[in-house]
Amino acid sequence: QVQLVESGGGLVQPGGSLRLSCAASRIFFRVYTMGWYRQAPGKKRELVADITSSSSTNYADSVKGRFTISRDNAKNTVFLQMNSLKPEDTAVYYCNAISPQGFGSWGQGTQVTVSS
């Protein structure tokens, strides 16, 4: 069973930065598309960014130019560097892994709160 463990969330002031990490295990990591999603209270879960096995990236319009997704296949880890954070970025951030066959798995989530 796929295991995804997120870390790096916390409380940060507007304009600040955070780096999320998601460590994957029990998968052949390098062939998976990895993604970060977020869910704010009362809202649907939405895609923030994803990165394919060939390292092609895709971002939500709301985070373009501020967030960067990357992966380290040697460490089975995907990262989300978040800069210029805004209060509207406050949410629980979830790591997602999609196999080449289309099967998806989720991490338990990490809270990001942007507030002064």
Image (cartoon, helix red, strand yellow):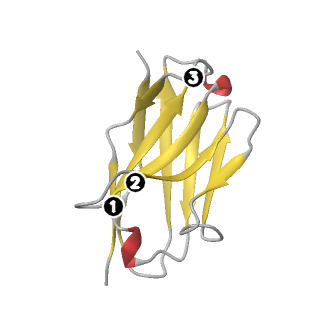
Q: Residues within 10 Å of mark 3 (few under 14, many from 20)?
A: some
- The amino acid beneath tag 1 is Ala
Q: Which residue is mark 2?
A: 38
Q: Is residue 3 left or right of residue 55?
A: left
Count of labels in the image:
3
Front-lying residue, 68 or 49: 49
Residue that appears at 45% across and 41% down: 95
- The amino acid beneath tag 3 is Ser
Asked whether disc 2 touches disc 1, contact meaning CB atoms under 8 Å apart, the reply is: yes
- The amino acid beneath tag 2 is Arg
CA distance separating discs 1 and 3: 25 Å
Q: Is residue 20 left or right of residue 106?
A: right
Front-lying residue, 40 or 12: 40
Q: Quadrant of the N terminus?
A: top left
Q: Earlier in the sequence, mark 2 or mark 3?
A: 2
The mark found on residue 91 in the picture is 1
Q: Earlier in the sequence, mark 1 or mark 3?
A: 1
Q: Which residue is mark 3?
A: 99
CA distance separating discs 2 and 1: 6 Å
Q: Compared with residue 95, is residue 116 higher up or lower down, i.e. above or below?
A: below
Task: Identify the image quadrant of residue 6.
Answer: top left
Could you tell me residue 15's position as x and y percent?
48, 81
Residue at disc 1, secondary structure: strand
Could you tell me residue 85's position as x and y percent?
47, 74
Residue at disc 3, secondary structure: loop
Could you tell me residue 37's position as x and y percent?
45, 49
Q: Quadrant of the C terminus?
A: bottom left
The mark found on residue 54 in the picture is none
Task: Identify the image quadrant of residue 98.
Answer: top right
Front-lying residue, 111 or 98: 98
Q: Earlier in the sequence, mark 2 or mark 1?
A: 2
Q: Residues within 10 Å of mark 2 (few under 14, many from 20)?
A: many
